[in-house]
Amino acid sequence: MSETVITRFAPSPTGYLHIGGARTALFNWLYARAKGGRMLLRIEDTDQARSTEGAILAILDGLRWLELDWDGEPVYQLARAERHRAVAEQLLAQGNAYRCYASPEELAAMREQARADGRAPGYDGTWRDREASDAPAGTHPAIRFKAPREGETVIEDQVQGRVVVANKDIDDLVILRSDGSPTYNLSVVVDDHDMGITHVIRGDDHLTNAARQAQIYRALGWDTPIFAHVPLIHGPDGAKLSKRHGALGVEAYRAMGYLPAALRNYLVRLGWSHGDDEIMSMDDVVRWFDLDAIGRSAARFDFAKLENLNGHYLRGTADAELVRSLQALVPELPDGAELGRRIDAEGWRQLERAMPGLKERAKTLVELLDNAAFLFAKRPLELDEQAAKLLDPAARQTLAELLPGLEAVEPWSPEALEACVRDFAEATGRKLGKVAQPLRAALTGRSASPGIFDVLDVLGREESLARIRDQALSIESA
């Protein structure tokens, strides 16, 4: 076996990149990087009825967005079908496989009989030792692997520990269907061998396949890779993560405004731990990562924890980088086309200037963008319910009295604006909140926003005064 660690991520392109698949890819990526090895990508597209080009692109795009790069070009399993067939014929020639002429009706009857006898449904070996001359005329046989019937198959799993399966419980697997197409377990073994895979890190739903695959490796005289079967991700209620728990695909988390660094950090902590560390850089994780720190119990996906973690990453990300992330996100939003038209080059610069205050209050990019909506709003502003309540006649009168002082502020800076508003509140015997809250409502149309003096500064003198006049003047016309 090669001394270089080689892992692989091998998704089936039948849909989006599942969040559980993303964690599997991350664990493979981390282990390869931690050991100075390589991670390969194999697209298992042999299910031609369900595999689509769109799903392949979605998987590749999801991996790139998560910044999980792979080594070399992706391998497409379907393109290697001839190699898989050749190995099936090799097993047949060396006596480790046989032709099976059982009809679908006979196979169904075997399953029913097994259930009636209280046994697991499986093939009963009818054609294991029969001659081909007994076959019905015109029947196209499948090829089955001749599994050992005595003894045990042992998997020394790096996560699950020693897994022992009695060989009598493993039936003879079809490795080549009657139409000549190879089956999953054969294709995986051949591809992993040919790609030099040293470590197979995957979900524990594949643990039942490990014994079958180990038997095929041994029959071919090939080294068996080291297995590490990772528990699946469960929802908050302890059930297997499903649509009813929320988003399943990586692209959905991207569209909801999560940062790839935050999602990576969250996923790596789902089943793997390093002491009490919660927030960690990928450089640190690569240094620390090993398979023995992966737990055997299923991890529970906690959406609130992910959101809080994402908020931490938002606050720690440079303002210009957040703007670039928003620019990439906007076209993917339901109202992205309209929003993109509203935000011109000056709007993006304005957004960057407002970012220090905005990112303190947001947990996702979508929330951040929503909080920044006041920057691009057209006058007169549409007031939300709470802002409308704040702007009662007394509040509008306060704005009318405040206006002359604001018009005289020079320079237009947060410090000068704060001094003006505080002086006005003191001079008129008002509490600062009684001035700042209607001012916020008039400037943003909302009751919550970044610091009000930063809002005035970012909007600029002309726009700020115009928005205040829109509300202050209404008292005169009332």
Image (cartoon, helix red, strand yellow):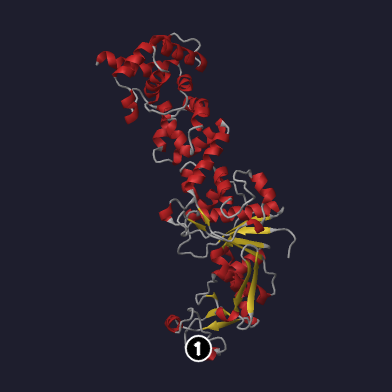
The answer to whether 268 appears left or right of 49 in the picture is: right
Image position, residue 147 (x, y; %): 60, 80
Q: Residue furthest left?
A: 478
Image quadrant in which the N terminus is located: bottom right
Depth order, front residue of 250/343: 250
Which residue is farthest right? Answer: 3
The residue closer to the viewer here, 19 or 280, is 280
- Looking at the picture, tell me which residue is in the foreground, 277 or 168: 277
The crowding category of the residue bearing disc 1, from other C-alpha atoms within 10 Å (few below 14, some 14 to 19, many at least 20), is some
Q: Secondary structure at mark 1?
A: loop
Residue under the image location 34 percent in, 29 percent down: 386
Residue 80 lies, in percent from the top left, at: 59, 65
- Residue found at x 66% / y 58%: 292
Residue visible at 51% across and 45% down in the picture = 306
Q: Is residue 247 left or right of residue 189?
A: left
Q: Quadrant of the C terminus?
A: top left
Looking at the image, is 154 positioned above or below residue 389? below
Q: Is residue 95 visible?
A: yes
- What residue would you read off at disc 1? 135
